[in-house]
Image (cartoon, rainbow, N blue to C red):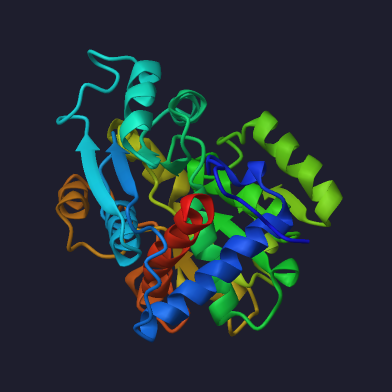
Amino acid sequence: MAVNLKGRSFLTLMDFSPSEIRYMLDLAHDLKSKKRAGIYNYTLKGKNIVLLFEKTSTRTRCAFEVACLDEGAHVTFLDSGSSQVGKKESIEDTAKVLGRFYDGIEYRGYEQSVVESLAKHSGVPVWNGLTDIDHPTQILADLLTIEEHCAKPLSKVKVVFCGDIRNNMSYAWMYGCAKMGMHFVAYGPEALKVDESVLAAAKAVAAETGATIEVCHTPECLEGADVLYTDVWASMGEEEQIPERVKLLTPYKVTMDMVKATKNPEVLFLHCLPAFHDFETKAAKEWKEKGFDIREVTDEVFRSRHSVVFDEAENRMHTIKAVIVATIG
């Protein structure tokens, strides 16, 4: 069946069918091959895109800008310091204004309700670059990376998310795995409670696609994993919780012992980045001086043959390009 995503917003993978997600992944594979061959179709020529950032970023901003420029679009970047969004102008009014100027809007920030409001009132496709409860463009990049490095169909892949199992990446993975019929395990401390509504929604989809969605607190769940995934232990705005998080999450740090516990010599390590894997960052150094090791993955694993994090980072651009081309190209 033909897939047509023109005019659709990309707010969460839960809004899309497995065949529509498959279409975006196939398009990303194709666009990546064409870029490497120096082939550009300029499918976004004459289009204008605005990027709204309440949270800072390296990969998301660069991926959106390069993706747009590759296909011939013009890009405007607005952060919280260079616009009136949410300060002197409501989200609804901002959406109505930007929808008159631009063909598509990207939002990266905090509340999911903001990106939903932009989509409701702008009249143009809106793309979720990250919110507190979801990160769908990251999951598309992760799925593309798995397909490039794992000799299994997605429906046979087991992903174990280690650490803070109630953060936006864990929830985004639940949605992605549920939609694509995959096996997902949230592996972390019992003290961190997964949102029951998120879990229920993922399991409802899983019942239709054949996926398995689990929450586990013991290391037995690591066996058979094809992918080990983790994220930083404290998100932006949660820095005061770091001492508590280090104590709580250190047993779930991705180490080479954890890699071996999968009993899969070809297991992949993925991370949305940035990662604390050594002490070469200002934050890691400062917390180490205070007596806290904030690394969620060891340098040994991060630099090992299992790690495909930089292929994964590159794939942010190819998958974001696919989403934009599919919805306004």
Locate residue 162 relative to residue 309 in the image: left or right: right
Give the image location of residue 159, x and y in percent: 63, 63
Give the image location of residue 303, x and y in percent: 35, 78
Residue 166, quarter of the rendered image: top right
Locate residue 168 relative to residue 202 in the image: left or right: left
Give the image location of residue 71, x and y in percent: 35, 64
Which of the pair 270/50 is nearer the observer? 50
Q: Is residue 228 visible?
A: no
Which corner quadrant holds the N terminus?
bottom right
Give the answer, above or below, for where 102 lies relative to 96.
below
Which of the pair 262/72 is nearer the observer? 72
Total marks shown come to: 0
Give the image location of residue 205, x and y in percent: 78, 45
Residue 12, quarter of the rendered image: top right
The residue that appears at 64% across and 80% down in the rendered structure is 264
The residue that appears at 45% across and 42% down in the rendered structure is 128
Locate residue 178 relative to residue 307 in the image: left or right: right
Q: Is residue 132 visible?
A: yes
Residue 310, quarter of the rendered image: bottom left
Which of the pair 235/154 is nearer the observer? 154
The residue that appears at 48% across and 46% down in the rendered structure is 135
Locate residue 319 relative to residue 263 in the image: left or right: left
